[in-house]
Amino acid sequence: MSEPSPEDELEQRRRIARQFIEVIPHARALGMRLDQLSAEGAEISLPWREDLVGDPRSGVIHGGVISALMDTCSGAAVMAHPTGARSTATIDLRIDYMRAATPGQTIRAKASCYHITRSVAFVRAWAMDDDESRPVASATGAFTVER
Amino acid sequence: MAPRNESLDAIKSRRNNTLNALVSSVPYIRWLGIGFDRRGDELTAVLPFDEKLIGNPMLPAIHGGVTAAFLEVTAIVELTWTAIWEDMEQGRIAPDAAVPESLPRLPKTIDFTVDYLRSGLPRDAYARARVVRSGRRYASVHVEAWQDQRQKLLAQATGHFLMPQDG
C-alpha cells in the first residue's frame, strides 16, 4: 500500500467539503450553489426568489437569507482549510448589513478562514450582488473544529 | 390606551389582525413557517420543525442560518409591533396584508450578532425579543431562542436597527 499523495489528499478534502454543502437540506431549499472551493476559501451563490423577500414594499431579500448564506459559506471555508476539519459548527457570527441587496439579483458570498487553531477557526465573509464594488454585507465568525 | 369599555372581541380582533397582517405580508416569514403567539402585547415566535430547516443531516441539527434568521425575524417583528402599538390601539392604523401601503414600514438591520449555545434539535423552536433601547433613529434588540426548556437557550442574539422614518 502506498501513502496517498498530497494531491489525492487535497482532492479528497475538496470532495468532503463539496458533499458537506450538497447534502445540507436547508442549503438546497434556499437554492444555494457552490461555485468555488479551495484552500483559500469558498464561494456560494444564491439567486433572488420572491418567497425569500423580507420587505414586501421593496422586494429586498430578508437578512436571514444572507445569514444562512454567510454561515454556510463560512462553514465550507473551514471544511476546505488544509488542516483538515472533520466537521464544524458555528460558535458565533456577526453580520454587518451595509446596504440592501438589489431585488432580482443573485447574491454571491465569499468566505475565507484567516486563522485556525486546534479547536477554533476564525472566518471572514462578504456578500455581493451584481455591483461587486459595493458589498451588501460582511461577516466575521468563530467556528468549532472537530478533528 | 383603548377605551376601558371597548368590547373584548373588538380589542382582540384589532390586535390579532394587525399582527397577522404584519407577519403574513413578509414572504420569507411564511417560507420559514414562523408564527407568533400573542398574550397581551407579549409575543412568542414559534418555528415548527421542517426537513428543509436541517443543516446537518447526520445529527440531525437545525441549520445555523435558520437559527440566525429565526432570531432576526423575531427581533424585527417585536420592534415593529412595539413601535406601532400606540397607533394601533388608537385606531390610527389598521394594517392589511392585501394593501401594501397600509403596512408599517420595517426597521432595517444594521448589524446582527448570534451566539450559538446549543445544537438545534429536530423539533420546534421558540423565541422572544426584548427591545433594550429604541430611539427615534436607532434601536437595540436582544433575542433568545430555546426548544424544550426555556432555561436552556439554543441561541441568543443582539441586533441594531435603523428605525423607519415617517413620510
Image: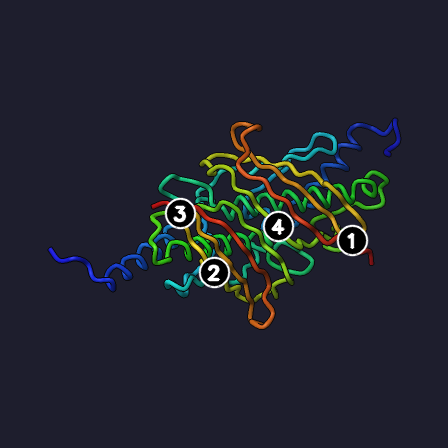
| Type of amino acid at the residue the image marks with label 3 | Val
| Type of amino acid at the residue the image marks with label 4 | Phe
Q: Quadrant of the C terminus of chain B?
A: bottom right
Residue under numbered circle 3: A145
Q: Which quarter of the picture shows residue B61?
A: top left
Answer yes or no: are tags 3 and 2 on the same subunit. yes
Q: CA distance from mark 3 to mark 4?
A: 23 Å
Q: Residue at x 60, y 37 (%)?
A: B144
Q: Quadrant of the N terminus of chain B?
A: top right
- Whether the residues at callouts 4 and 2 have beta carbons within 8 Å, the answer is no
- Whether the residues at callouts 1 and 3 have beta carbons within 8 Å, the answer is no
Image x and y of residue A47, in percent = 51, 63
- Whether the residues at callouts 3 and 2 have beta carbons within 8 Å, the answer is no
Residue under numbered circle 4: B112
On screen, A138 above or below B73? below
Answer yes or no: are tags 3 and 4 on the same subunit. no
Answer yes or no: are tags 4 and 2 on the same subunit. no
Image x and y of residue A22, in percent = 37, 54
Residue under numbered circle 2: A111
Q: CA distance from mark 3 to mark 2?
A: 16 Å
